[in-house]
Image: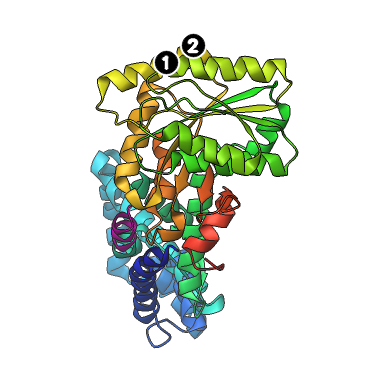
Amino acid sequence: MFNRFKEKLSSYKEALSAKIAEKVSASGANKVPRPEEIEAEGGLALEAGGSSKRDSRSKESGEGPRKKSRKESQKEPEKAASLASVRKEPQAQAPGNGEADNKKSRFSFLQKAKTLVFEQEIILEEKDLEEPMWALEMALMESDVALPVAEEIVREVKSDLVGKKRKIGADTGQLAEDSLRSALITLLSRNHLDFDEYIRTKEKPVKILFVGVNGTGKTTSIAKVAKYLLDQGYSVVLAAGDTFRAGAIEQLEVHGNNLGLKVIKHKTGGDPAAVIFDAIEYSRAHNKDVVLADTAGRLHTNINLMDQMKKIVRVTNPDLLIFVDEAIAGNDAVERARLFNESVPIGGSILTKTDADAKGGSAISIAYVTGKPVLFLGVGQTYPDLVKFEPEWLVDRLMGEAEA
């Protein structure tokens, strides 16, 4: 699972490691001034000008101030008058600014040199990260991460790295992974919804409607969520709202029989909104906790079916509308989630077949693009093969830090 994502990240890690090695080499021990030279440079930075430096050198040599000649004494009044006139001109300010710039430059040098020599650290600057960030963005996009999501991750990683001190000799591969891991967790934790807490606190019956395109495992996902809820002690009713596809009602009935659940159904071709409405009424009458309603798979381009979906939402007023798609669909799944969300605002997503997904990009992208959380990941064919989504769980597997 997600092995392609791990492979693609190696280019980013290598680029960052190479850039840090290059920076260390450029400022290596053979090129770094000795501590006494640094202190000397710092001392020079604090001096006011050339005359002060000469005075300093004369003091060190034990010589006193040089005695002025008779000629120099005679010229002093002329020099004083000339200097007075110069001070009145605005241009006379320029040398002072240049001197301040020199002091600032020396101070900056002193800081960097001291950091390198005494603390054995380097400071990463924005220009150092151009190549690694490009490699990271390409790795993300090749792993089916949508472009705006990849750009957001790169911004987060760069923000974490720029201006930070890094120990010379530290594991740069680990440094690269830590920054990326932090960015992914931050992104995936936005709008996070705890499904268990939601069901526990919501007024019963909780009405959950499942939508998506054909053949993505929507009906099977409903059965998996039903098993998940049954294991937590909730009572569940299934609504066969897919009255369009041949065999859809029978498929849901098979799952209902396997799990011992009541399935509310009408004949094929009936009004799906009426089926789901009846299931809600049945649940209220029999004190059931949750209604899980199936709907016909549809493409966002099918205007009639999308209008029907809007009617179902309007009539049944679901508490939670869950979009279901395949993780292996990559950016197609991301785009479909975005379009469904524009038509009938979804509350969360389930990604199926994540056990067959080698890239992992859609799992990262859907939550960002829709602004709604991923709730579950389907990881197999049986009813228990449903994992409640947690950002750390996904990131551990994307980064290869846990068993896939």
Q: Position of residue 391 (x, y in %)?
A: 56, 50
In the displayed structure, 131 sits above or below 144; it is below
Q: Nearer the viewer, residue 399 or 63?
A: 399
Q: Nearer the viewer, residue 184 or 52?
A: 184
Amino acid type shown at disc 2: Val
Return the residue at label 2. Answer: 315
In the displayed structure, 11 sits above or below 246; it is below
Horizontal relation, residue 308 to residue 200: left or right: left
Q: Is residue 140 magenta?
A: yes
* Residue appearing at x 41%, y 41% in the figure: 366
* Residue appearing at x 69%, y 24% in the figure: 202
**Of the residues under marks 1 and 2, which one precedes in the sequence?**
1
What secondary structure characterizes most of the magenta part? helix
Q: Nearer the viewer, residue 78 or 22?
A: 22
Q: Position of residue 388 (x, y in %)?
A: 60, 47
- Tell me the quadrant of the picture where the N terminus can be found: bottom left
Marker disc for residue 138: none
* Residue appearing at x 50%, y 36% in the figure: 252
Amino acid type shown at disc 1: Asp
Q: Position of residue 176 (x, y in %)?
A: 45, 66
The residue range painted magenta reads: 134-145
Q: Position of residue 264 (x, y in %)?
A: 56, 24
Residue 164, can we see it? no
| Residues at marks 1 and 2, CA–CA distance in whole angstroms | 11 Å
Q: Secondary structure at mark 1?
A: loop
Q: Secondary structure at mark 2?
A: helix
Residue 398, can we see it? yes
Residue, far top: 315
Return the residue at label 1. Answer: 271
